[in-house]
Image (cartoon, coloured by chain):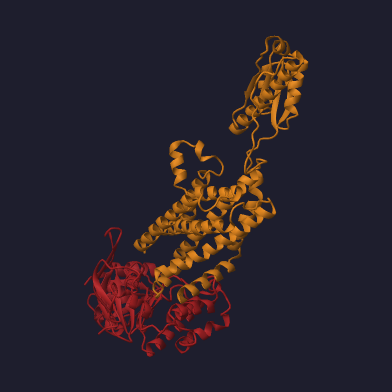
Amino acid sequence: MGAVRLNHITKTYNNKSVVAVDDVSFEVQPGELFGLIGPDGAGKTSIFRMLTTLLLPDTGEATVDGYDIVKDYKMIRSRVGYMPGKFSLYQDLTVEENLRFFATVFDTTIEANYELIKDIYIQIEPFKERRAGKLSGGMKQKLALSCALIHKPTVLFLDEPTTGVDAVSRKEFWDMLKRLKMQGITVLVSTPYMDEATLCDRIALIQSGKILSIDTPRAIVNAYGEQIYALRASNMYRLLNDLRASEYVKSCYAFGEYLHTTLKQDNETTRNELMMQLRSRQHEQLEMKPTEAGIEDCFIKLLVQPV
Amino acid sequence: MNTIKFLLQKEFRQIFRNSTLLRSILLAPLIQLLVLPWAANYEVKNISFAVVDHDHSPYSQKLISKVSSSGYFKLVGYLNSYNEAYALIEQDKADVILEIPPHFERNLVRENQQKVFIAANAINGTKALMGSSYLNGIIAGFNNDVRAEWLLQSRYNAAPYIEVAPSNWFNPLMSYKVFMVPGILVLLVTMVGSMMCALNIVKEKEIGTIEQINVTPIRKVHFILGKLIPFWILGVIVFTLGMGIAWLVYGIVPQGSIFLLYGFLALYLLAVLGLGLLISTYSSTQQQAMSLSFFFIMIFNLMSGLFTPIESMPGWAQVIARLNPITYFIDVMRLVVLKGSGLHDIRYHMLIIFGFAVLLNTWAVLNYRKTS
């Protein structure tokens, strides 16, 4: 039995005119680090709010830890941890007061579960007399995570925990999640960053309220099925236009400092002809190399060819 | 019980940490109580009056000096024609014109009657009304003086006439401060109860902390009580401070039972907090809550009988005033503080406020469930 199970969940807003979550079903295994990956407005937060009993689904049913999200909402509230995307702790209380407050709310103490939050809390403990509103972004996230963990939840919901956090803090944050997973806590995390997807055990790619694909990051990448070539030249914009106009090219997207391109027929001849074609258009410092597909490539492909 | 205890602990910690809020809860009402009663005064003094004297007789001089020595009027012009006096009104230099016709003294003596003309600038209605009625009173007094003088001289028996000697009960000196202070205190307690409470709850919505609270086992009833109790206590504190000022600065000591006042306050705060809670369920930002409570408090203030008597309002306005909790508390304050009324006299007030408390809180809780 899954730690979290969704069965044909649909959620609409504004009298059914806006469909936020469209017939979504998936299952998360106990102790899994599961990622919901999708752009802003894909429906990630709505799914989280339904699973944490803040929102009622229109149709469908879901369970968390075996409890129904509608009928047994009280049971769920005492056993899950939720960290909303927006910092929502008391800004006028200090770090320690916030933590103590949430511990007391769950009828426990900081001391009782200190082991669980130690790794995280130790980094913000020097600032425990500081008001939460005066912390930096990364420290706020650590405090919010500590508060969400203080009652030793069985399932942890993290809604875009790394949005607006610097690269170093993001990496630290994911290391922490890995350690929580080792403690046996099921973690559901959502993120708009594709590069974070590979850090999850399994991911669901979501767009416009629909699940595009659910699998391990490796399997999703392997399922890409085509060779991607990374191209670069001095004038990237002209290169992009030329590639898209070329009869050999199937798709071409900007990806960091390279253009990720797939070919209609991938063989030595077409590759050479493409390069000749580009050189004839006076592209300088032209470079082409095969590269491995990333989650973002898969995401774009799934968007272009809907399942 | 334990849940409520630490919710209260958290709430008071936040209130005491927010020095601006604390100042506006405690200090601002007190300053208002020290300032407003001196300004909110119906007594009209320094009415500028112009005299058009066509008679220039000893009697007309006597009348003018009687008016100017009354303490209410300030002579700004002694003129020969009505048009000149009217120009003063146009320039806003005079509020009232007193015109004494030619042969004023002669007609008064010979024909036993004479008319004078009063014209008042009614742009400031209160001043015009008070000015002309004061002037009427002074002229009536002058009339009696003249009659007494002539009756005495003619050695007739005194003609019977009724003299009215008014006596102002419960506020013998007709001091407006005594009348206003208890009322203003009610307004201040109402502000703390409804507006501050509504803003506090909506702040949790706006910042998003209510989400975090909602995913915990805290029950809604605990959360609401955790919000109401601190502001109930603050309301009692503000009231106590206000009564202290009323005593120290204005010398107002309740004639009736102080316990009765606090008993009514306890009930009244429940009703007002219910209003605050209700406002909070209808607003999602502090700005909305602010404008909504401002709307209610404005109407409640002006239609509470504090400034103008309810009996002189038109019928529909009286209905609104009767649906206004402030009306009842102001009434009770004046009854108990000035008149010394007992529980028996205010039992209907108590019943009505209890009704308000039940209605507003039930409505708020029902709406709170629906919207979350």
Q: Which chain is red?
A: A
Q: Nearer the viewer, residue B24 or A303?
A: B24
> Can residue B146 be seen at all in this image of the molecule?
yes
Q: Which chain is orange?
A: B
Residue at screen point 46% across, 88% down: A112
Q: Nearer the viewer, residue B132 or B352?
A: B352
Q: Is residue B268 above or below residue B154?
A: below
Residue B45 position within the rendered picture, expressed as x and y whole percent measured from the top left? 69, 35
Side of B350 where B164 appears, left or right: right
Residue at screen point 44% across, 47% down: B323
Q: Is residue A287 above or below residue B274?
A: below
Residue A80 position within the rendered picture, expressed as x and y whole percent measured from the top left? 37, 79
Side of B28 where A75 appears, left or right: left
Residue B337 position within the rendered picture, expressed as x and y whole percent measured from the top left? 60, 50
| Residue B261 placement: quadrant | bottom right
Residue A102 position within the rendered picture, expressed as x and y whole percent measured from the top left? 46, 77
User: Quadrant where the N terminus of chain B lies?
Assistant: bottom left
Q: Is residue A253 above or below residue B257?
A: below
Side of A13 where B241 appears, left or right: right
Q: Residue furthest top?
A: B110
Residue at screen point 51% across, 36% down: B312
